[in-house]
Amino acid sequence: MALDPPTMLTISVALAAAAALYLAVEWRSIRVPSLLFWSAGFATITVGSTLALLRMSGLLLIGIWFANGLLVVAHWFFLLGVARFTQVRLSRAWYLIFVTWLALLFLPDEPSWSKIMLLANSLLVGLLSLRASFLLRPHGKSLSVGAVQLRYVLLIHGCFYFAKALTAVVPGTLIDLASLRGEIIQISLVEGVMAIMLIALSMTGTERYRREKQIARLAERDPLTALYNRRALERRAPNLLAEASTNRPGALLLIDIDNFKPVNDLYGHTAGDQLLVTLSEMIRSVLPEGALAARLGGDEFVILLGNASSERIAALGQTLREQFHHAAAQAFTTPEAVTLSIGANLFDQPPASLAALIEQGDAALYATKRSGRNSIRIVDLTQ
């Protein structure tokens, strides 16, 4: 099969339609806006490439001006998708691209018409592609291999179109858009097929990676409080615990809500959940940099600190108890005050395991409960 212009356009139609359908299916499952814009871009290329075949039947307005205009629109959709992906707001000036293309409709019908049309189309597509590539620049290493690939594919694609625009001003270059004749047009059709494949693969890979990262992030978070769950704590704690030394003691604080059951009984479980969320937000607000916090289950929370001291633990515990007691008293009236009991361990040697450390914290916590609640007990294992 000869790779003549009609064949190359037919291949472009098939590839773009497949990419549009795949991205649309992905969007239906995860509802990420960037996927919808990218799908719209490939759908627009599908329509534009189909209409481009009509120029050989003499329908030049539809087959050239309208079809090439849809190529510009497709890359504008790609830019919008990248902007949503990188959470960047585009200037309204980018909408002037459509005004520029509309002005080409009034070009006089003369021998230079094809060159002017090719020049304008190439500059607009190149500009949109390079802008999208630039938006991805800060995100290349931080997101995924797919994002890096998409960035460079768009960069090369944009540079190709700028180079293509230069050929339009070279004297003697054959450019005939009506019959798709000219070496640069042939090269452009081949590049278009390759670009469709590479851009589609990069876009799907980029979103798939982000979705996998999001799933992994959700799997290690408590669904109610958004703090780490116990499994995530067990995975992350060893690095922090291993840093414990005489000069930089570590600490574990085990936190339990006093008289939590009456809140659920009197006001319902929704109120109890709100109280847990309130406490988690307070913990997050006082958590030092490098520390870990997790919900172990029920109304029990844990904080792991590095470079701690008895004074630092006491101050943090006091702040949490005062803030929580004030918030609970304002929100709920109960027979007994809703407060916090805290058991803490200070250690200067890496413990045998996190489970052993939590067990020691449990002993300190229940000693606090037995002594009247609403207090903090610190066990200094460094002495």
Image: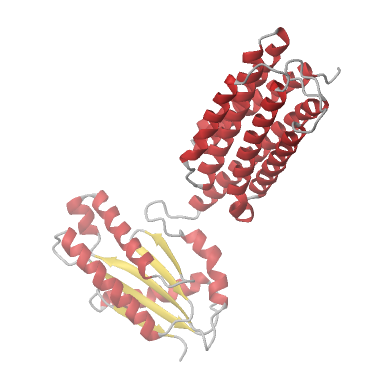
Above or below 109: residue 349? below
Name the quadrant containing residue 285: bottom left
Tell me which residue sits at (22%, 49%) in the image.
Answer: 268
Outermost residue to the top = 57
Tell me which residue sits at (32%, 67%) in the image.
Answer: 256
Outermost residue to the right = 2
Outermost residue to the bottom = 383
Above or below 338: residue 343? below
49 or 198, which lies in front?
49
Residue 317 position in % (x across, y down):
32, 76
Tell me which residue sits at (50%, 34%) in the image.
Answer: 95
Identify the image's colour scheme: rainbow, by chain, secondary structure or one colour.
secondary structure
Residue 356 is left or right of residue 125, and the answer is left
146 or 208, which lies in front?
146
Residue 87 position in % (x across, y down):
49, 47
Residue 256 is left or right of residue 155, and the answer is left
Name the quadrant containing residue 325: bottom left
Residue 173 position in % (x across, y down):
81, 28
Tell me which residue sits at (24%, 74%) in the image.
Answer: 374
Residue 276 is left or right of residue 8, and the answer is left
Quadrant of image for the C terminus: bottom left
Above or below 38: residue 257? below
359 or 380, which lies in front?
380
Residue 335 position in % (x across, y down):
13, 63
